[in-house]
Amino acid sequence: MNFDLSDEQELLQETVRQFAANECPPNRVRAIFDAEEGHDTELWKGLVELGLGAIAVPDEFGGAGQELLEQALVAEALGAAALPGPFLGHSLAGLAILWGGSDTQKKTWLPKLANGELLGTVAFAEGDERWQPNEWALEGGTTLSGVKSATPFGAHADLVVVGTAGGELAVVERGARGFAAQPLPGVDRTRRIAELRFENTPCESLQNGRGASARVRDAGLVLLAADAFGGAQRLLEMSVEYAKTRQQFGVTIGSFQGLKHQLANLAVEIEPARGLYWYAAHAFDHVREESERTAALAKAHLTHVYMQAARDSVEAHGGIGFTWECDVQIYFKRAMFDRAFLGTPATHRERAAALAGW
Amino acid sequence: MDLSYSAEYEAFRAEVKAFLAGHWPLRGDEAKLPGEKRATLLRERAIAAGFLARRIPKKYGGSEQSADVLKAQIIRDEFARARAPGEMAGIGPSMLVPTLLEKGSEWQKEKFIAPTIRGDIIWCQGYSEPGSGSDLASLKTKAQLVGDEWVINGQKIWTSGAHRADYMFCLCRTEPEAQKHGGISYLLLSMKQPGIEVRPLRQMTGAADFNEVFFTDARTPKDWIVGKRGEGWLVSRTTLKHERNMIGDAQNALATFEALVALAKRALKDGKPAIQDASIRQRLVQLEGYVRAHQYSGYRQLTKAAKAQDPGRVQLMNKLTSTNIGQEVAKLALDILGDDGLYEPGERQLGGPRDNAQWVGQFMWSLGSAVAGGTANIQRNVIGERGLGLPRDAAVQRS
């Protein structure tokens, strides 16, 4: 019985935390958040040099050869720092090619994704909350014609793994004929999104896309859940810190029971829930029959908790919490992203109910 | 991360299973004994085999095993699986025995521990008073040393099981001159004496599980004090540090949740099973998120304890998490019950499914957890102050 992280896993998280503290402190997060250009290539290069571009990709393709749990632990640490960048989409593009690609496809793209030569992303959204592989309607084949919405860093990516009808996956490279990416006014400026348009655009279908797409989705759900846990935990720390510092009526406001109970409730929502994403990642790697449902449950629960934590944290900070300059708003918007991306909590609760045979 | 047990522990599990296969259920004439007798017989044998009363020395009736949270968990799992009676439940074994082990005198341990863990004597706890609930240390029940006896006057309240108890362990003010916490002593006394009157309190469920206890010159010998005079507050804070059940609450929550799912599958809404209702499905899965989180949090605490590491402040959150889950279960169950929520709790059958009246009982009992053993608001203070390090309320008198 060992439901805890290994020393290596602790070290991995610590490394990412240190990287974020040194290379992307809050003022840099804010600068990127406010910038016109939303992709900081230097920051991304630093993450790739740490080997975080393809954590779960095997060594033979240039990856770190770890499991989804390690990838999720990194997502937690990045979420805690609200670190802007394409980690999510890039990770999922690598997993899609790893699980769905032929040997040639893997050899062609994975090493370049791992070393950062290519920036990858996934285009799953088709609007009206249609994110799931069985809902994709864009016809695949040798060319694509149609639209994908809300693609993370879609205007920056060199390689896009596109979800197509029948739960298939196809790869489109930047600069391909008839391919255009239009930035969208996404609420979370740490993870820019774009709408992709294809017009007779040449693409390459992944050999086993149909078999891989639901797994890629599930991996995405776990990574979002982990990001949400990291962000929620950081919001709790920020709110507690503020309550210990801010004075009113001659005392620190954290001594007032109203605020104290609000923060205690927040802690009770967040801290025991860490194991939900741990277990979902563990199940993804080792308990296959549970993996789809636990991923849905973790995503639904933790992104819901994150959103509520963000709302409570604005309240706990008072007027300052409602301002653009306060970091709470950045986490608030990351919570909105985590909640909606790949489907809302309600979507995944219904899926979890159906998967239980209810 | 690995939720299985190592070979060493699986071997231990096999021993526990073999013991249970050989001893439970009882056979022959023993199988015809009343339930409590059968439970006592099994407990005696399980103690002799080293599976129960593990942290209690042999000379006090225990099996004196070294602390091992994983073995303790395996024993609980296997006894539960075999539906065999485990450790004697109740306030005596769970609270008094650990306190005596740490703070009791030699004769007290010899006299009280063995019969308590066998279930031969039953205890009640005299802590709360009408004016002293969350602020327990303000208690007023007085004990005065007269010759060789303490003479006790005052009143306790919410005393669970006082009507069945043989003895009480209680907190009394013995040093009226001392400060609030320093004036309290921890006394043991017999409930079977003329100076004690027990009056049952009827709960909102209709049953009467707890009581008021009035002391009018009740008496107990001078040496029935645990710790020294004026140390009672500290003595009462003694907790069992070994083999604490890290995941018991979560396992109960999971079992209750599964029962709720079963209820939703058989109860009808608009002529269809309630579980097919979109909003019931949403709420069930939302609740399951909390139940699973609680379960995995328990696994993590168990792992930390097994490695002799501090699980951290999340431990302080277990009770409130259980309470919150119980409340949600209750509310959802009542919505599933529909019209059957019109009827009083109990065993009564109304032509509806068999255990609906029990769910009405659960709806009320779930509030018991929010007020008993430290209210939910007191839990929030503890989490805020000890867990998050927030300052205490400056306006509150602590001493």
Image (cartoon, coloured by chain):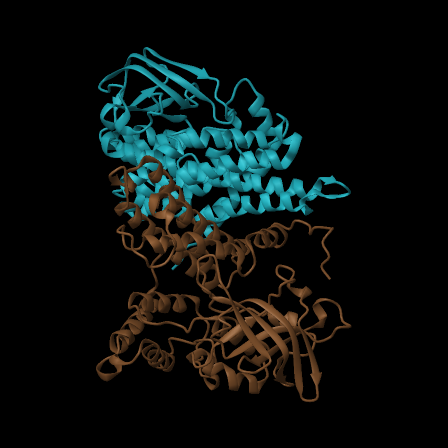
Chain colours: A cyan, B brown
- B51 or A91: nearer the viewer: B51
**Residue at x 42%, y 29% (from the top left corner):** A340
Residue at the extreme bottom? B148
The quadrant of the picture occupied by the N terminus of chain A is bottom left
Left or right of A303 on screen, residue B149: right
Task: Please state the total of marks drawn on the protein image.
Answer: 0
Q: Looking at the rendering, which quadrant does residue B81 occupy?
A: bottom left
A139 w.r.t. B195: above or below: above
**Residue B276 appears left or right of B179:** left
Residue situated in front as seen by the camera: B355 or B343? B343
Q: Position of residue A249 (x, y in %)?
A: 76, 41
Question: In which quadrant will I find the C terminus of chain A?
Answer: top left
**Left or right: B104, with B300 as reference point:** right
Name the residue rendered at 72%, 70% in the picture. B182
Q: Nearer the viewer, residue B329 or A191?
A: B329
Pinpoint residue A198: horizontal percent, then vertical percent: 32, 14
Position in image of residue A259 (x %, y %): 63, 43
Residue B1: tell me if it is visible: no
Q: In this view, does B114 lie to the left or right of B39?
A: right
Location of residue B115 with respect to B320 vertically, above or below: below
Position of B377 relative to A188 (above/below)? below
Residue closer to the observer: A217 or B203: B203
- Where is residue A82? Give x, y as percent: 53, 33
Q: Residue at x 36, y 58 (%)?
A: B346
Q: In this view, does B228 lie above or below A299?
A: below
Q: Quadrant of residue A33?
A: top right
Can residue B311 be seen in the rendering of this structure?
A: yes
